[in-house]
Amino acid sequence: MPLLQTLGGALFGAVLQVLFHKLDSNQVLDYFRGRKLDEKLLKNMRRKLVSINAVVDDAELKKFRNPYVKSWLDDVRDVLLDTEDLLDEIDYEFSKTESQLQYQTSSNKVRTLESKLKELLDDLESLLNQKDDLGLKNVGGVGSELGNKVLEKRNESSSLVAEEVIYGRDEDKEIILDWLTSESNNHNQLSILSIVGMAGWAKFPIKVWACVSDEFDVFKLTRTILEAIHKSTDDSRNLEMVQGRLKESLTGRNFLLVLDDVWNDHRDQWKSLQTPLKYGAKGSKVLVTTRINKVASTMESNKIHQLKQLRKDHSWQVFAAHAFQYDNSKSNSVLEDIGMKIVEKCQGLPLALETIGCLLRSKSSVSEWEGLLRSNTWDLPIEDSKIIPALLLSYYHLPSHLKRCFAYCALFPKGHMFDKESLIFSWMAENFLQCSRQSKSLEEVGEQYFNDMLSRSFFQKSIIQDIMYNKTRFVMHDLLNDLAKYVSGEMCYRLGVDRPGSVPKTTRHFSTIKNPVECDEYRSLCDSKKLRTFMSISRNCGMSIQELVSNFKCLRLLSLFDCHNIKEVPDTIADLIHLCSLDLSSTCIKTLPNSICSLYNLQVLKLNYCSHLKELPSNLHELTKLRLLELIGTSLRKAPVILGKLKYLQVWMGGFEVGKSDESNIEQLGELDVHGELSIKNIENMVNPYDALEVDLKTKKNLVGLHLKWSLECNNDESIKEREILENLQPCRHLEKLSIDGYGGTQFPHWLSDNSLLNVVSLTLMNCKHCLQLPSLGILTFLKYLKIYGLHQIVQIDANFYGNSSYAFASLETLIFDDMKEWEEWECNTSAFPSLQHLSMWNCPKFKGHLLEHLSHLKYQTIDVCKQLETSNIEIEGVKMETFSFDMLLSHTPLQSLNIFCCPSMNIPINHSYHFLVELRIIQCCDSLTNFPLDLFPKLSYLRLNECHNLQMISQGHPHGHLKSLTIRKCSKFESFPNEGLFAPQLESFWIEGLEKLKSMPKRMPALLPSLNNLYINNCPEVESSDGCLPSNLKHISLLNCSKVVASLKKGVWETNPSIKSLFIQKEDAKCFPGEELLLSNCPILQCLLEEGLPESLSQLRITHCSLLKKHYKKEEVVDWKKIVLI
């Protein structure tokens, strides 16, 4: 079978289908008839488009071999898009006339539209005259027809991605695992492994990961690493700030960092990125993947591993897993023979094997497989080596409408995290989604498009979860990103990524990856008058909205997300008659002009995190095509009115503030299809409980989270009204997250104690200060997180809390009690809490009950301000006292982390070891504790003792092999470490502060603390070094107000510590040492630097609060300047 018959259709076949539909629409025909325009122009246009449609598939095939065909096809594309713009403009004029009876299109406007149509007809005629000279054949658009059938016969469930199996990489995996678990021979450097191989050669997923790709931006990359560590967004504005934060996060900690797909071979940029990484603990690892050997050497890799092509048998396994999808009934010897030959052409590249396999999964005939094998595409002379023929074949077999969606992805940088819903709405705004059946919505069609591309491996699920919204993101492989850019040509341009020079005039989709101010080519953008997409991915769009409106009248999508220079929206926004999507999220706008309501084509309006925006235009309901309104993180004082009449509108609300007057219109929320999370604030202003019923939360099945907040404390006289209001705010049974804050009633609503909210997974009850009893929450089968805070009238938690469930709190993992001032007793239920892992009790001063000693699954516990906690008699060190059963709790639960705050009566029995405990924090507790026996905690990794006022010493009889961090602060009677020294070979961080009686540091520190990286001593005026030496691996030292320590160190001690990178000495002279960073702070008597100069290894010198030194170096002629000029 010829290849043509297996193709999905040309890239612009979908555009032609759109144009045919528009030409046949009643709007265009009625407009022509109403203005007495020549209808023959429309018929002529249709005939010419049919002629173009007949040859466009053939042209798409030949464009790679014939540059003239490629140029012709580009010209056809531009004329087709101009035609679409013109027909859309006619449709807009018709719609405006229909909705505004007083509006009439001016005669000049009519003549202009007619003139444009004639020009386009001339252009099409000229292009059709060239088709014979170019040897283009009429093929009747067969490919498009077949391609569209592919999507229809696919089972939608096939879009689910199963967990992948990695074939042929067992040896590579072992090499990496050996490297990860090995000790570094060089204690002064990071351990760096570079994996060199073609992209797509099955590298391994990990948790801390940063995609680098073509752009090696040190600032952005550092921020990406920091955000991955903390799993939250970072707001650093410059390199110094973000690297300072990263240094603080990594200091003394082991880490594994993967830098994926690195192209940069500039050593200075790597050095800059590496600066904060060097503060990590010994054993930290950096794994680099790259396609270039030179990059591996630039990164100063300790080890370089070359990935080889997959062996033939492994290649077949990858291919077969996707082509047959483990369905042996489809496999036969003929297909396997053809498949083996196709596998050979993929040359052992997993990505090519996967995409070709996915392609053939939908093709079951031998002729289809043979057609792909014989394709000339395998041998196409593509000038860009990054485009792999196998991937290009997979693209060819996409239906035409999916080709357009795929090519649009060239607008995004490599490594971009795609949000499925946002991308679908972008496709919608560009009119890529074609709904052939009335039973499906545009959103459902977009979902089908995306899932089909996902099943063909054009997208993959990201291994990194979206932190803020807790949803799955998707990524596109770098090679597919290259392919998208290749097939889109000049249509898409990414500022700061694509070739510098000037933005092509034919560009239709534009994104700013870098700050436009930094890019010279940005000035040429205004020549691209037909721009359809302006998307700012950087934080500065470089133009005002007024300038954008003036220059780009054809915009369909305008995204100015996080552009802080945008502070107002002009009335002229209405001139963007084609605009379908507008994103003003995280800008500084305060109002929206009423003129925005005349954007009749607007489908998407995003106003998330607009903190200054408090209300919307009153006529917003005139946007009859609006399908998505996002207000996440934006708190409105006045609900948008009559929006409920918009049939397809989804509203993603943020906050709504109930006003004191009737103008707040909270009942308008009842008409909206609210999605996501909704916060209703100032509920105390709601006068009539009936208004709460009008909000109709019970029917809002798409609401995932609900936050109800009262801002003022209510009088007891109003408790009945408050109860009625809360009863009427009952949410839908599909709700997953609920918080109630500041409720003034004495009882919780019935719907919290029955089966109304069985799907809730997170519940917070805060500041409900008058409630006398907790609801029956034990029946919430799926509840995982429960926080009860500030319920001051609760004295006892009894059986009612568990409900009638025999398996109460079956899924609960985290339980937090905080600020429970009157709580005394907790009735136990031995069958409850089977899944509980984290229990926290903060500021419960009267609690004196049992602490659920049957909790066998508990791993983390925090106890804070439970001064009355008493359950058993314990005798320790001759002191008999009533104390909480610390012994029993740790004996019967596998606690890994325990935090105890402000519990002075508590004590630690010493009759056995606490084997499970890994982290222990004791703060303002254990008044009788005089000796902390380290041997009782053999697995302890982190120990913090703070304000234990009677603690005198730490004792130890055996080496401790797990302790990595030790902090002792403000223990006023502490005076000694173990007699033979503190033997903790894994200790990395040692912090002592405010130990006024301590006179000596631990003995033999260099020998007994070989892993120590960070030493912090503050306000220990009597302490001295026992032997005048420090461990040789120390990297960071802070000595503050401890002059005797500095004085006791032997002369030349710094020369014996080659690892030192930073030293902070306060109120003392600085010593000469070989380091990279020196901070001199509060040294009032320091007048000059050392005569012999500073070490050459210093890369950073900071001097603060050294008045005499500052005065000395203000004189630029001083000789000492030569000592620091090279730093």
Image (spheres, rainbow, N blue to C red):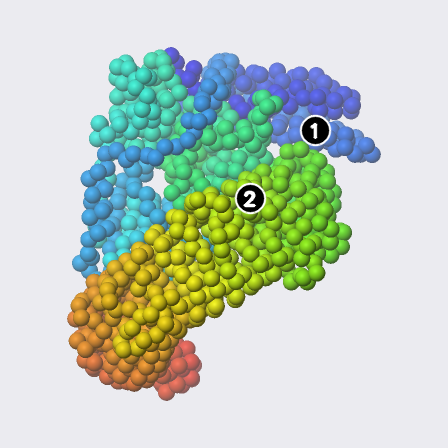
Which residue occupies the foreground of this view, 983 or 1098?
Answer: 983
Q: Amino acid at mark 1?
A: Ile
Residue beneath disc 2 = 754
Which residue occupies the foreground of this view, 928 or 337?
Answer: 928
Residue beneath disc 1 = 90
State the quadrant of the N terminus.
top left
Q: Secondary structure at mark 2?
A: loop
Q: Percent position (x, y) of residue 1003?
A: 19, 77
Q: Percent position (x, y) of residue 503?
A: 52, 42
Q: Secondary structure at mark 1?
A: helix
In the displayed structure, does residue 116 sit left or right of residue 791?
A: right
Asked if residue 809 is positioned above or below residue 644 in the image, the reply reads: below
Q: How many marks?
A: 2
In the displayed structure, does residue 1082 sit left or right of residue 87?
A: left
Which residue occupies the foreground of this view, 504 or 807?
Answer: 807
Q: Percent position (x, y) of residue 635?
A: 63, 53
What residue is rendered at 63% in x and 31% in y? 85
Asked if residue 717 is positioned above or below residue 45 in the image, the reply reads: below
Between discs 2 and 1, the one toward the N terminus: 1
Q: Amino acid at mark 2?
A: Asp
The answer for how far apart the CA atoms under marks 2 and 1 are is 57 Å
C-beta proximity under 8 Å, tags 2 and 1:
no
Residue 540 appears anywhere in the view: no
- What is the residue that sits farthest to the bottom in this orientation? 1085
